[in-house]
Amino acid sequence: MAAAAAGLVGALVLTGCSGDSSDDSSSTPSASSTSTATGGSGSSPSAASDGLQGSWLATTDGKAVALVITGKQAALFTTGGSVCSGTAGEEAGMQMIHLKCTDGTKTRATGMVDSVSKSALAVTWSGSLGKEAYTRAEGGKFPSGLPTASLGS
């Protein structure tokens, strides 16, 4: 189980640091996808605050969730195969995240950041998922105290 979570973090680090590449031969979606979701407002968010930037990890419903925010771009990966990309930033005085998932799920389509600190992020997603708490991943390493033993595959 921990190996699956470690693989997820490895993929997270690789996609978070991949940059722009002129080789589009890969069929695997990446965090640098040009597709964005802007939500119902029709306006693009301004860049996410520095506190929101980075790699965030959570365990929800027995699955590892990795959220990466760089500039205005956001990507989310879950064990089980969900890969989502979109935008993160300020809209009408609130920090918002808008994602579109390759598998068509809308569980994390729109999220409002409730709080962000040096080590923790709380997001309320519209729809049935509700609140989700994340811990910052520093340097591609698991944060201490992350419950990895219960991760699903």
Image (spheres, helix red, strand yellow):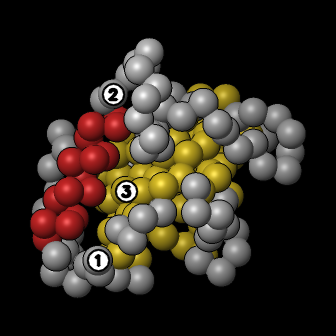
Labelled pair 2, 1 in contact (Cβ < 8 Å): no
Residue 18, image x and y in percent? Answer: 33, 27
Q: Secondary structure at mark 3?
A: strand
Residue 24, compared with residue 121, is above or below; it is above
Residue 153 is labelled as 1
Q: Give the image quarter of residue 149.
A: bottom left
The disc, 3 or 2, on the residue closer to the chain's N-terminal end is: 2
The quarter of the picture where the N terminus appears is: bottom left
Q: Give the image quarter of residue 41.
A: top right
Residue 52, image x and y in percent? Answer: 46, 42
Q: Amino acid at mark 2?
A: Ser
Q: Secondary structure at mark 2?
A: loop
Residue 102, image x and y in percent? Answer: 58, 55
Which residue is disc 2 drawn over?
18
Q: Nearer the viewer, residue 45 or 77?
A: 77
For the residues marked 3 and 1, what is the alpha-carbon distance in whole angstroms? 14 Å
- Front position among marks 3 and 2: 2
The disc, 2 or 1, on the residue closer to the chain's N-terminal end is: 2
Q: Give the image quarter of residue 110.
A: bottom right
Which residue is disc 3 drawn over?
66
Residue 95, image x and y in percent? Answer: 62, 45
Q: Amino acid at mark 1?
A: Ser
Residue 53 is labelled as none
The disc, 3 or 1, on the residue closer to the chain's N-terminal end is: 3
- Dot 1 alpha-carbon crowd within 10 angstroms: few under 14, some 14 to 19, many 20 or more: some
88 with respect to 65 (left or right): right
- Dot 2 alpha-carbon crowd within 10 angstroms: few under 14, some 14 to 19, many 20 or more: few
- Residue shown at the point (18%, 39%) measured from the top left: 139
**Furthest residue in direction front, as rendered:** 25
- Residue shown at the point (85%, 50%) measured from the top left: 40
